[in-house]
């Protein structure tokens, strides 16, 4: 698909007028004209090459920012919420033909523009980005290099890389102490275990012929990844680095995210347009929630009370109330909305 350019919708005048305009419609909104509200939701619109900034309380899109390349699939935020980091993957999907992106861009969320970037010397298809609060570095999966690349987010320079030992290394989660990284490898499906401090590969845990996405339990004891050959979630023990069991799903899953309290695991199921709620005490699905078409990725709010779901086919983002499992709001984001992150807050 050709690169589509869109003007930023929060230029200087827009930033001054938008809070006033929203205040007329929603009197309880309060935020600086020059900054997104704390915990603002960031959404990467894959088929548009833009980043949406969404007010998480009311589900109002505050800005749409061109990424400067086509196209970002995932997004990460700086710890202070001032900047977003978007790897420019290309116009294809993992393992399919398409352009090979080579940039990671840095977006100033107040200025609504790209203010920096790192460009690899060849196409690497950079995909997932996670900022490690323990060392302040940005870790980005670089699929075609079979590595996780490490960037200094202040200077946007490359400071290292870690081999994954596998192909199609797609998504990344980091342990809460910042020591270990876990990478989902799509095909053959498995998980690469990385020592981030020593910058070395520790193990590759095989799962199935093909998997998707990855999550880490709130206590760091279990890794979850969605099998694509059967409707189930694999459970990997982080201590032994062994596959220890399965959780059956109604259909194949995609994005997975644990709730902050460690009680639930939420799984996006694209084919049925649902989110499955797994009770991690019984390791069973206890509820499914109907959503707009093709729920893809799930992110938690900083307070752990809400879950945000990108619904790619309809281009919407939906907010769910954790525990009650009710829809709080749904809003239009952009064509094939994909990656989500909260400004100033990394994935659990």
Image (tube, helix red, strand yellow):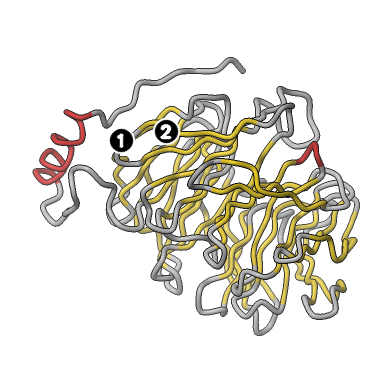
Instruction: Please tell me which residue is depicted at 66% across the width and 49% down the height of the picture.
Output: 150
Residue furthest bottom as drawn? 281
Residue 96 occupies which quadrant of the picture? top right
Instruction: Please tell me which residue is depicted at 71% across the width and 63% down the height of the picture.
Output: 196
Relative vertical location of residue 263 with respect to residue 214 in this rendering, above or below: below
Q: Quadrant of the N terminus?
A: top right
Label number found at residue 347: none
The foreground one among 276 and 335 is: 335
Question: Mark 1–mark 2 contact, CB under 8 Å?
Answer: yes
Residue 144 at x, y = what percent? 80, 36
Instruction: Please tell me which residue is depicted at 70% across the width and 47% down the height of the picture.
Output: 149
Q: Quadrant of the C terminus?
A: bottom right
**Other-residue count near label 1 (Cα within 10 Å), few / some / many at <14 / 14–19 / ≥20:** some
Query: What is the spatial separation of the Cα atoms under label 1 and label 2, in whole angstroms?
Result: 9 Å
Residue 342 occupies which quadrant of the picture? bottom left
Residue 30 occupies which quadrant of the picture? bottom left
Residue 331 at x, y = what percent? 37, 43
Depth-wise, is mark 1 or mark 2 nearer the camera?
2
The residue that disc 2 covers is: 115
The foreground one among 17 and 251 is: 17
**Other-residue count near label 2 (Cα within 10 Å), few / some / many at <14 / 14–19 / ≥20:** few
Instruction: Please tell me which residue is depicted at 48% across the width and 52% down the height of the picture.
Output: 341
Identify the secondary structure beneath mark 1: loop
Residue furthest top as drawn? 2
Give the side of residue 27 with respect to residue 139, left or right. Answer: left
Give the side of residue 11 with respect to residue 91, left or right. Answer: left
Residue 66 at x, y = what percent? 43, 27
Relative vertical location of residue 242 with respect to residue 294 in this rendering, above or below: below
Residue 242 at x, y = what percent? 87, 73
Identify the secondary structure beneath mark 2: strand
The foreground one among 160 and 254 is: 160
The residue that disc 1 covers is: 111
């Amino acid at each position: 698909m050709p690169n589509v350019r869109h003007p930023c919708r929060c230029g200087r005048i827009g930033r001054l007028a938008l809070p006033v305009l929203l205040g007329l419609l929603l009197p309880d909104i309060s935020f600086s004209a020059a900054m997104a509200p704390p915990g603002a939701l960031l959404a990467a619109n894959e088929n548009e090459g833009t980043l949406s900034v969404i007010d998480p309380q009311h589900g109002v899109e505050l800005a749409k920012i061109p990424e400067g390349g086509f196209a970002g699939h995932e997004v990460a935020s700086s710890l202070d919420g001032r900047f977003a980091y978007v790897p420019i993957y290309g116009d294809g999907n993992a393992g399919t033909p398409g352009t090979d992106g080579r940039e990671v861009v840095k977006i100033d969320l107040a200025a609504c523009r790209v203010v920096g970037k790192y460009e690899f010397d060849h196409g690497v298809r950079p995909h997932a980005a996670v900022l490690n609060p323990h060392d302040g570095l940005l870790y980005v999966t670089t699929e075609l290099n079979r590595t996780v690349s490490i960037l200094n987010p202040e200077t946007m320079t490359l400071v290292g890389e870690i081999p994954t030992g596998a192909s199609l290394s797609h998504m990344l989660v980091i342990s809460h102490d910042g020591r270990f990284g876990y990478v989902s490898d799509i095909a053959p499906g498995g998980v690469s275990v990385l020592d981030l401090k020593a910058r070395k590969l520790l193990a590759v845990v095989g799962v199935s012929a093909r998997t998707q996405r990855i999550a880490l339990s709130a206590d760091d004891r279990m890794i979850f990844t969605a099998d694509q050959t059967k409707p189930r979630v694999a459970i990997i023990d982080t201590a032994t680095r062994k596959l220890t069991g399965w959780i059956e799903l109604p259909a194949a899953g995609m994005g997975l995210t644990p709730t902050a309290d460690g009680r639930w695991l939420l799984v996006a199921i694209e084919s049925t347009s649902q989110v499955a709620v797994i009770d991690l005490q019984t390791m069973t699905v206890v509820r499914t929630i109907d959503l707009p078409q093709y729920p893809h990725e799930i992110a938690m709010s900083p307070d752990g009370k809400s879950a945000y779901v990108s619904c790619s086919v309809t281009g919407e983002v939906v907010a769910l109330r954790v525990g009650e499992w009710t829809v709080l709001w749904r809003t239009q984001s952009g064509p094939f909305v994909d990656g989500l992150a909260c400004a100033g807050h990394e994935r659990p």
